[in-house]
Every structure is written in structure tokens, then in C-alpha cells.
Image (spheres, rainbow, N blue to C red):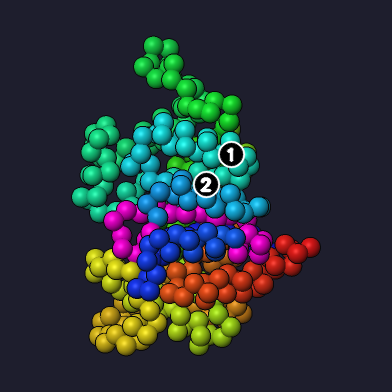
Amino acid sequence: MIPLSVLDLSVVTTGTRPAHALRNSIDLARHVDALGYVRYWLAEHHNLASVASPAPDLMIGQIAAVTSNIRVGSGGVMLPNHAPLVVAERFKMLEALFPGRIDLGLGRAPGTDGATAHALRSRLDRREGDDFLERLSELVLWETRGFPPGHPYNNVVAMPDDTPLPPIWLLGSSDYSSELAAQVGMGFAFAHHFATYDAIAAMTNYRDHFKPSGWRPTPHGILAVAVVAAETDAEAEKLATSMDLNRLRRDRGEYLPLPSVEEALAYPYSDAERASIARNRSRLFVGSPATVMAKLQPMITASQPDELMIITAVYDHDARKKSYSLLADAFGLAKKAAA
């Protein structure tokens, strides 16, 4: 069966404050580590009432310290918000402390609104436009020490210098990142859970155009999908109502804590809002394990991912853990971990 991983946003709900959401992330990581999930990634978002973690590198260290086998990484570091040298040093430190268990996932977006992005970058260099490729190139040069003679950075060393950068993954929701990941020979993760671009096209394009590199000899594509699993279809559908209302609000620019099921069920939806929710459900896989597997299988078959990364952002933490447990059983992870 295909390996499973986790993408965690450290979800803040109307009943869970941000500090507790961070502790829930640590608890969930322990849980899925025992189930046999292979990777646990944490997102970077700023100024969002629904997401508790703006600093995935800090959470990576905390989670790696309390787990044993699972790889821990960023899903991802929003590179435009950071000096490449800082990213290199922090992830080399994490790799030194937890060798062979760290991933460096990189994103092009700011992970926030325009004003917050300006505040994050106002004391950094003021490069204009989309400078992701420039920053990625600089990050690679810190690792290879490939700055030319006479360059002001030529004698600057990213410490610890006896530790390599962990594997780099490019995150994307369009064809651009799939093409770039293929060209530079890095891993690729596609965000189906919010992308409007076709996941099958992105994954196929990455695999077909991949060029072996010092980072990876072969392509490795991760497909990130939003899933809500429960014992029955009815129970899963009920849990998913929180995500339905939250998505509806986000589409209106309202980034509020995740509402409870009771609030979502009591909300007076208009016909237009119900139609919007129905459209958004194309990005969400909901049901019993058998139902979820049946819904996922056509996309897995068509896109041929090397790994499936699951995001389950439901209101109740125990229900979230149960969803990951049910998926582990459905995909055969629990038996594999116990073997």
C-alpha cells in the first residue's frame, strides 16, 4: 500500500486556544508515529486565527524529540519570509540533532495577508516581485558553498558545517512548482486540499520531466489531500460540517477559529452557500474508511503519487486522532508497524 504522512496546521478551534492547539500537534505526532505514518509536516501561517503555528522549525524540534521513527519537516517554510542563510542554519541544526529524520519543505507564498507579509520582510532585503527562485538558489549555494571567488558570501559558512541540509521538497498548487521541482531534481508535494490546478496534471508533469540531481536520483511526489474518516459515513459527514463552514468563511476572507459541529449545523446556509460547499467538497474526502478509500483510489491511480499526505482539520481532537487511526488500518499501516 502507498505510504501515508500527515500535514498539520495546528488548528485553532472555538473551543481550543492556540497554545493548546500546539500541544495537540505534539500529541497527534506521537499518535501517528506509533501507527506507522512515515512523515509529519507542519505549516507556516501568520496572522490567522485558525492556525496556531507560525514557526514550523520550532515545532519540528519539539515533535522530533518526542517521536521515534517518523520524519518531521516543514510543509512548509515560506521562503520569501526568511533569509536563506537563516533557513540553512536552522535546518542544519535540526538535522544535526535528529539525523536522517528532518525534511525541508519550501513554499513560494507568504502564508498570510499583504500587511503581515510586509511586516515579516520589512527588515529583510527588499527584492521586488516573485524572488522564490533567487532565494532557492541562494539556499542551495549555502549548502554547496558555491559562491564565486570574490563574492561577499564566499567566506561565510552555514553552521553546523559538518551536517548537510535535510532533503528539500518544493510545495505547490500549480504547474510552476511541479516543473521547477522536476528541473532541479527535488521532491515535490502538491496541495490538492486547496489547489484549483489539476493534481493529476501536476504529479504527471513532475514525474515525466524529473532530472536526477545531487538532491534526488529519482522523483518522489507527495499528494496532500484533506480527509475526514469515521466509523460511519454519517458520522464523518457530521464531523466535516466544521470544515465546510470554515472553508465558506475563508472564501469570504473570514479567517476565524474552526467552528464546532453544533455551530456548523445550526448555521443558516443560503442556497448559494450550499452550492459553494458542494463545490469545495471536490477537495475533501469524507466517509467511513471503505468510502474514503473508494473516493481516493481513482485519484491515486491516475496521479501515481509515491506518498499520500493527509490533513484532517476537524473540531474534536480525539475525532482527528481516530480518523488517522482508521486510515492507518485501511491502508495497512498499523499491521506494518506492529510487524
The single residue placed furthest to the top in the displayed view is 150
Can you identify the residue that label 1 sits on? 97
Q: Residues within 10 Å of mark 2 (few under 14, many from 20)?
A: some
Span highlighted in magenta in the image: 31-52
Decide if residue 213 is in sight here: no
Foreground residue among 276 and 57:
57
Type of amino acid at the residue the image marks with label 2? Gly
Foreground residue among 196 and 112:
112
| Alpha carbons under labels 1 and 2: distance apart | 8 Å
Residue at 40% in and 55% down: 53
Q: Is the N terminus in the top left, top right, bottom left or bottom right quadrant? A: bottom right
Q: Secondary structure at mark 1?
A: helix
Q: Is the C terminus in the top left, top right, bottom left or bottom right quadrant? A: bottom right
| Image location (x, y in percent) of residue 287 | 53, 80
Type of amino acid at the residue the image marks with label 1? Leu
| Image location (x, y in percent) of residue 85 | 41, 31
| Image location (x, y in percent) of residue 319 | 52, 76
| Image location (x, y in percent) of residue 203 | 51, 55
Q: Secondary structure at mark 2?
A: helix
Q: Is residue 53 above or below residue 244?
A: above
Can you identify the residue that label 2 sits on? 61
Where is residue 166, by image quadrant? Answer: top right
Q: Is residue 90 above or below residue 170?
A: above
Question: Does the magenta-highlighted stretch encompass residue 262?
Answer: no
